[in-house]
Image (cartoon, grey):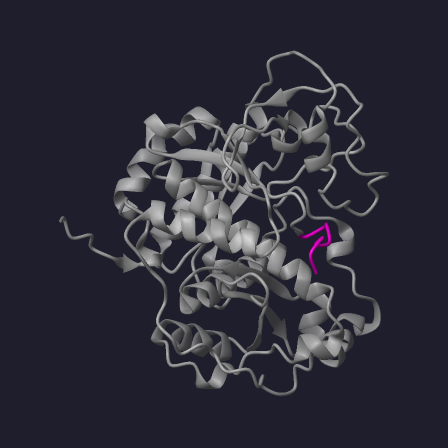
Amino acid sequence: MRRVRTVPAQHYRKAAPAEMLARLRPLAAAAGITRLADLTGLDRIGLPVFQAVRPMARSLAVSMGKGAHPAIARISALVESIELHRAETIEGDGNFRPARAREAALWARVPMAPGQPGLFDGDRPREWLAGHDLVGGGGMAVPLEMVSMDLARDVAPDIRQSSNGLASGADRDEAIVAALLELLEREGRARWLERPHAAKRATRIALGAIPDRRIRAALARIAHAGLRLMAWDIGEGIGVPAYYCALVEMDRAATLVLPPGVGSACHPDPAAALMAAIGEAAQARIMFIAGARDDLEDEDYRDPAGKRLGIAKETLAFEADGARPFPAGPPWVAGDAVELRDRLTERCRDAGADAIVCVDLGGGASGLATVKLLAPGFGDHERPSAFA
């Protein structure tokens, strides 16, 4: 019998950074990306952050990317912009129809976002896309507007467009793994945000006792920059390590100018999950410093009378380190991305998702496949969880 070599789950991606960058160059040009900028030096932390600029975008013209190395940050920014372009330009078949009974029941489980007037209306005629259910198998049609990121078109009021579950990889299975991790991260964060303050404080990680060299190096950089990092375990109930981080200026005057940088991430390797969340928080700081993202608003910068710092210290208990120990066990191992995909699908099902619908957005032949996954009932940044 052939021996299957198992590798740590964080190494499920096939392409090396240099190979992936070579694949992305023609795809970036075809998507209308005109500039790739290194923003790392705008902040004093030094964690690599890049932005890709796509002037003719129908959603975000600026996509951010971060990573442990500049090449990874470049890839992250380019991939986010390319996958948004693919989601903006996807088209239906031109046939409008109401939802069938099974479709109406499934999509009505998507929680409402703030300001949304009501749940999914199955009687409204709309265009549909072909999807495949990763949990139950078989086909499941998806409303075009739940996949499309074309923000220039009119959208039915019962649907809130979101990039949650939009992801890419060297092949379809890698893309699905990345999308599943994002779905689990957003669900974990949605559940955590709904908890009482005392319960949130109890999930605070004891950063001083983490042995991982990558994390300790990042913490040293952050401390040298005069910032404070806090991290919380948001993985309870989803079965995969997930963390939420905040980077805060403890100086009152600096905090009045710059909002805290926050980020979250999910990964089978706890150290990789925490490093990714730290990177997201550092990226958020640079996003505010650069001010280039087209979804930033004046309210993101306003903080009358130092209210932000007071709330941060009182609610999140910044004065002391956390008490929850960082996991000491080994990360998952997986034979390949297919095995990891199946294990993550099981975690989603255990967390309450009885359907995870995958829509292929193409690109597999180019070396960058893109998918959109939807898990009705899961929460995200705007929608509460149906399972909390």
Where residue 193 sits: x, y (%)?
Answer: 70, 64
Q: Which residues are magenta?
A: 381-388
Where residue 112 sits: x, y (%)?
Answer: 77, 44
Marker count (numbered): 0
Q: Is residue 258 something that shows in the picture? A: no
Is 181 colored magenta in this rendering?
Answer: no
Which image quadrant is residue 271 in?
Answer: bottom left
Where residue 388 sits: x, y (%)?
Answer: 70, 61
Is 384 colored magenta in this rendering?
Answer: yes
Which image quadrant is residue 155 in?
Answer: top right
Magenta stretch: helix, strand or loop mostly: loop
> In the depicted view, which residue is nearer to us: 286 or 139?
139
Q: Residue furthest left?
A: 1
Q: At 68% from the left edge and 30% from the top edge, which residue is drawn?
A: 102
Residue 297 is left or right of residue 223, and the answer is right
Vertical comparison of 60 with 336: above or below: above
> In the depicted view, which residue is nearer to us: 117 or 78?
117
Vertical comparison of 180 with 388: above or below: above
Residue 230 is left or right of residue 210, and the answer is right
Q: At 15% from the left edge and 53% from the top edge, which residue is drawn?
A: 3
Which image quadrant is residue 56 in?
Answer: top right
Where residue 26 sits: x, y (%)?
Answer: 35, 28
Q: Residue furthest top?
A: 94
Q: At 58% from the left edge and 41% from the top edge, which residue is drawn?
A: 355
Q: Is residue 358 something that shows in the picture? A: yes
Residue 298 is left or right of residue 203, and the answer is right
> In the depicted view, which residue is nearer to us: 307 or 84?
84
